[in-house]
Amino acid sequence: MLITRASEYAILSLIVLSKTSSPVDSETLSHQLSISKSFLAKILQALAKNGILKSFKGVNGGFALLKKPKDISMLSIMSAVEGKAPAVFDCSPSEKDCPSEKASICSIWPFLNKLQGKIDTFLDELTLQDVIE
């Protein structure tokens, strides 16, 4: 699935964070977006680990954007929270990595591979700023 709940929550969180100049803690974000705090915390940590958010510790701690919204692609957000590039299909970009090991006889693999490439390009060009506007 291309857009999972984790990706959706990551994007929603980043939109909120893009509209504030000070760090926001996970509890505040969780309450504001009606998202499980523990699930959101994992998402925010993945975004911080991948250089999209900066984490601040302490009483006034929380999370803030590390980059400008125009410099954060949807592909980077989704890849950060999913742990891999988002895929529409189980098809692999290379025949040798086909999960069913039938790529050489699959008549739709070339089409699906081409479609995935177009989606990857679109998501890489689409930024958080585009979504905010």
Image (cartoon, rainbow, N blue to C red):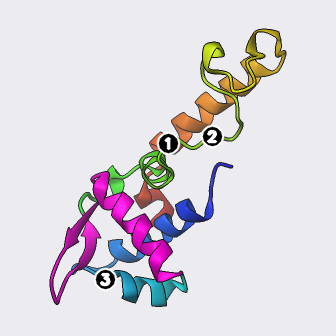
The residue type indicated by label 1 comes to Lys
User: How far is disc 2 from disc 3 in space, using C-alphas?
Assistant: 30 Å
Mark 3 or mark 1, earlier in chain:
3
- The total number of labels drawn is 3
> For numbered disc 3, what is the local secondary structure?
loop
> For numbered disc 1, what is the local secondary structure?
loop
Determine whether, in the image, residue 94 is placed left or right of residue 13: right
Q: Where does residue 36 sit, x and y in percent of width and height?
A: 52, 81
Q: Which residue is mark 2?
A: 87
Residue lying furthest top in this view? Answer: 104
The residue type indicated by label 3 comes to Asp
User: How far is disc 2 from disc 1 in space, using C-alphas?
Assistant: 9 Å
* Residue shown at the point (34%, 77%) measured from the top left: 19
Q: Which residue is mark 1?
A: 84
Disc 3 residue crowd, few under 14, some 14–19, many 20+, Cα 10 Å: some
Determine whether, in the image, residue 110 is placed left or right of residue 60: right
Query: Residue 25 got which mark?
Result: 3
The residue type indicated by label 2 comes to Ala
Q: Which segment is the magenta one?
A: 36-65
Q: Where does residue 90 sit, x and y in percent of width and height?
A: 70, 35
Disc 1 residue crowd, few under 14, some 14–19, many 20+, Cα 10 Å: few
* Residue shown at the point (27%, 53%) measured from the top left: 51
